[in-house]
Image (cartoon, rainbow, N blue to C red):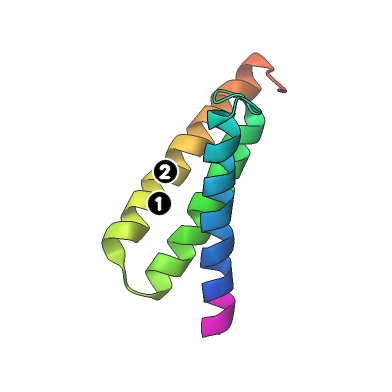
């Protein structure tokens, strides 16, 4: 189980770094669906890893990060943005 949770955490970190790198290099829009999905997935994965490790400040941060991403995706869906 520990190996699985560690792999989930590393995947989450990779997703967040990927999204940041893509936006920073202008290859992905920071206000688009793709970026929000990458951030949501990465933050959820890191939240799982942090909670499993009882790293509650990090788990809380990633929970808030996930909520922000979910709200952004909801707003994008309401206006019909697909980029």
Assess whether residue 12 is covered by the magenta stretch: no
- Find disc 2 in the rendering and name its residue: 65
48 and 13: which one is in front?
Answer: 13
Q: Residue at x 59, y 78 (%)?
A: 4
Q: Residue at x 32, y 73 (%)?
A: 54
- Find disc 1 in the rendering and name its residue: 62
Residue 40 visible in the current orientation: no
Q: Residue at x 40, y 51 (%)?
A: 63
Residue 67 visible in the current orientation: yes
Is 43 above or below relative to 77? below
61 relative to 80 in the view: left or right: left
2 and 1 marks in contact (CB < 8 Å): yes
Which numbered tag is attached to residue 11?
Answer: none
Where's residue 38, x and y in %?
60, 43
13 relative to 56 in the view: left or right: right
Q: Which residues are magenta?
A: 1-5
Secondary structure under the numbered disc 2 in the rendered image: helix
Residue extending furthest bottom? 1
Q: Residue at x 42, y 43 (%)?
A: 65
């Amino acid at each position: 189980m520990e190996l699985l949770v560690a792999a989930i955490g590393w995947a989450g970190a990779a997703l967040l770094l990927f999204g940041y790198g893509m936006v920073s290099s202008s290859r992905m829009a920071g206000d688009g669906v793709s970026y929000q999905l990458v951030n949501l997935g990465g933050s959820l994965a890191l939240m799982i890893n942090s909670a499993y490790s009882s790293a509650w400040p990090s788990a809380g941060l990633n929970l808030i990060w996930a909520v922000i991403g979910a709200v952004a995706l909801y707003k994008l869906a309401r206006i019909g943005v697909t980029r």
